[in-house]
Image (cartoon, grey):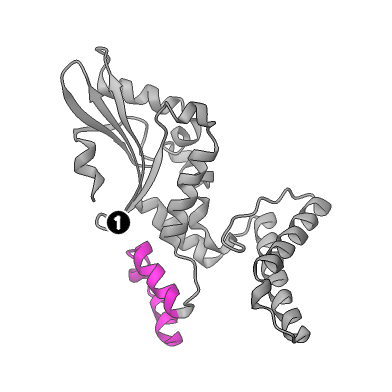
Amino acid sequence: MKIFIIFFFLSSNVISSITFEELDYIRSIANKDSISIIESGTRFCNDFFEKNFPINEYKYKNFFTCKFSKIRNRFYIYKLAVEKKDSTSLKEFCFNILLSWPEIFDHMDENFKSQKKDYLNGFYVDNFFFDKVIDFSNKYDDDQRIITNEINNYILKNRNNFSNDNVENNTLIKKEINKINKIYKKIISESKSDLDNLIIQILNNVVRYKIFINDIKNFKSYSCNWTPGKGIEPYVKRERFSEFENI
């Protein structure tokens, strides 16, 4: 099985066309406890938009939502049900909406396409410790406190898994300490693993942005669509959210 996996990753033709769904399957063969890239990426993205907007704002204002479509092999970051009541062109209307979201807006620029976006961090599963991404400050003392707290949290949450064998318990804890230190060194050095590079390549192929527009004046529904690095002018098409919802 290991030989098959090595052969799979060494094949450049396969790498160029691999999907997250296939990658999740391969990783589950190698490690049944592996984190699903699709699930962690989608959950983290949605959590990002929810946590970064106070409830009194996003409860009444539409904000971006994240969704992975296995049917289309696309990761959509979309905003829906925006009402258009004036005579502004659809492209200009959508452009003005996007302009108010600088981090997303920058992703349309070819010069910033390769930069990591905070809302996509959930796809980089090599950076996960205990099912979460940890923010390190690059200040040694502060980061060591973060590491200690995370290990203490790990011990607390897994206390029922420990036995009366202290040697075995210490081995388990040491394994987690080594794991979080490895993550710490990787993040601080801003290095990329082979898996990171593969994830970057897949994200470049699958991420799409959409804004659904209800044209109240003309009683029609549209969507504006963007591909990262392809410029700020949207591709506009007739589309209702209901047509997109179940893909």
Residue located 49% across and 39% down the image:
50
Task: Count residues near mark 1 (Cα–Cα under 10 Å), then give few for <14, some for 14-19, many for 20+.
Answer: some
User: Is residue 38 positioned above or below 240 on the image?
Assistant: below
Judging depth in this view, the residue of 76 and 199 nearest the camera is: 76
**Left or right: residue 40 compared with residue 82:** right
Q: Which residue is mark 1?
A: 73
Residue 6 higher or lower than 130, as above or below: below
> In terms of secondary structure, where does tag 1 sit?
loop
**On the image, which quarter does residue 210 sit in?**
top left
Residue 69 image point, x, y percent = 30, 53
Q: Say if residue 9 shows up in the picture.
A: no
Q: Is residue 215 left or right of residue 26?
A: left
Q: Is residue 78 above or below residue 124?
A: above
Quadrant, the N terminus: bottom left
User: Which quadrant of the structure image shows residue 151?
Assistant: bottom right
Q: Residue at x 69, y 60 (%)?
A: 184
Q: Does 52 lie within the magenta span?
A: no
Q: How many marks?
A: 1
Q: In the rendered view, does 140 fall on the left or right side of 197?
A: right
User: Hey, which quadrant is residue 132 in on the image?
Assistant: bottom right
Q: Which residues are magenta?
A: 1-29
Residue situated in front as seen by the camera: 15 or 181? 181
Farthest residue toward the top?
87
Residue ID at (65%, 66%): 157
Determine the residue positioned at 20% across, 35% down. 240
Q: What x and y, as percent, mark residue 13?
A: 33, 69
Q: Of helix, strand and loop, which mostly describes the magenta segment?
A: helix
Q: Amino acid at mark 1?
A: Asn
Relative to residue 102, is residue 244 depicted above or below? below
For residue 28: magenta? yes
Relative image position of residue 215 (x, y in whole percent): 22, 21
